[in-house]
Image: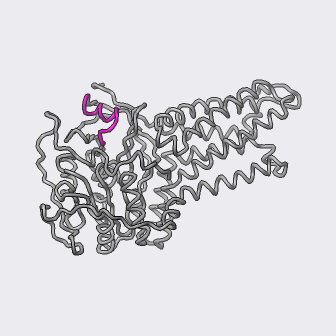
Amino acid sequence: MTSVPPSISTPYDEAEKGTLEIPSGLATPVAVALVVEKKVELQGGISAEVVPATNETAKKPHAKKKKVSKWTLWTLWFNTYRKLFTFVVTLNFVGIILAASGHFPYAETWTSAMALGNLNFAVLMRNELFGRFLYLFVNTCFAKWTPLWWRLGCTSVLQHLGGIHSGCALSGTCWLILKIVNNFRHHSVNHDSILIIGTITNIALIISALSAIPWVRNTHHNVFERHHRFVGWFALIFTWVFTILGDSYDTETRTWRVSGKHIVRQQDFWFVIGMTIWIIIPWLCVRKVPVDIELPSSKVAVLRFKRGMQQGLPWTNQSYGDKPSHTGCVSEGTHAEYHYMVCGVQGDFTRSLVNDPPRTIWTRQLKFAGVSNTSALYKRGIRICTGTGIGAALSTCIQSPHWYLIWIGSDQEKTFGPTISGLIHRHIEPGRLLLWDSKIRGGRPDTMKIVKEAYHSWGAEVVFITSNYIGNSEMMQGCKEAGIPAFGTLWDFDWTIIHPVSGVD
């Protein structure tokens, strides 16, 4: 998991703030009225009464916040992502040092295989099909009956597979640097083309890796998107060329083996095959699908697609050259006729949904699994979200009666419209629902007070959080200090929507 500088975050994004100005023609009057549970009293615990919120229930947020211990901050920072990253990088760097000093003969002989083996595993960790298989295996084998610490560990590892991805990618690049250095040290027996292509491949991998460091990814996301993806594809092409040239050239006779038999017997050749397959599979699932767009306000777009989906399969849309807008898939289940996306209107892509609504969109039909997919592991849980985070949280609570939904936002009814309101009230009974409209109640709630009371009264085993950076950090810190197992938002996603296509086929 990566960090986002507080300077670029605000307590609520635009969709969470809501709006009173509804552009004409964008939405019809909302027919489903949101009711707000009076489950968090100002001086008491959680009650089962559900009443419309009044001004008397409003409460301004607390100005003074409890100081978080340094140990809590450290444990949240050095999370499973960084633990996995540290383990992978440390193990590889020990191998690199041993190989460079002449104490690791296998790696000296098969340096390319060491590099490509790491890169192959890095790509595998980001493959949607592999991820879905891991989630399916864990949810099938370990749901509910295993000890809680084991289930929490499974969720944590699955959520932070990116640590293995980053660690293997960095290690593979460093192994390749060692390979190129060794080639130049023995340049007299290597063909010039191998030296040139190897250098180009290495430069491309270094650029791709540098573009993915947290500071670049979070403060210059367009730079990350263009370089990590497009330069990465460029590096894949040159990796193929470098591998074929290197495996075809005989350094002893200084001649080329043109039969190809020697190439298919090399480890690095099959590693490149695997890496290419993992990259291609998701793109084979790209389809142009029809979409209906509901615009309940100028701040939110609700996209409707055909077919139902299981919970915990996030969507993240991105138009190239634009800041990404993350959301989740809202669905009543695999049997449903439709599923929905809730998009905050913040960048060029999502603004285009308002200004020029498309009728079809290119999307990957193979969705990657998110942390919510592991909700099946737990007997009971709390799902808390703010603003457009409802898109990621709602399906879990719709599809499972064992999950309690807490949604905090401003002017929710006008901002998010009748579709989302209807899904909530048709499928989530009042006994496991808390809607906090900060506009009606006059301010933000004491979120940790709500979470603690809901966690204990509901008998929950875990809390899943979907919020912006500041809200996520506050709740994660509070849960850690209270001893409540919690998983928050990650700031590292892949993108599944490519771009809108105007008109009809």
Seen in the picture, residue 92 relative to 505 is either above or below; the reply is below
Residue nearer the viewer, 238 or 10: 10
Residue 374 within the segment the image draws in magenta? no
- Residue 348 lies in what quarter of the image? top left
Residue 128 location in percent, x, y?
48, 46
Extreme right residue here?
253
- Residue 351 lies in what quarter of the image? top left
Which residue shows up at 27% across the image and 53% down it?
332
Q: Is residue 486 left or right of residue 52?
A: right
Residue 72 location in percent, x, y?
48, 66
Which residue shows up at 38% across the image and 60% down it?
474
Residue nearer the viewer, 211 or 341: 211
Q: Quadrant of the C terminus?
A: top left
- Residue 497 lies in what quarter of the image? top left
Residue 412 location in percent, x, y?
20, 51
Residue 395 location in percent, x, y?
31, 54
In the image, which residues are magenta? 343-355
Question: Is the stretch drawn in magenta largely helix, strand or loop?
Answer: helix
Seen in the picture, residue 29 relative to 163 is either above or below; the reply is above
Residue 346 within the segment the image draws in magenta? yes
Which residue shows up at 73% across the image and 26% down it?
196
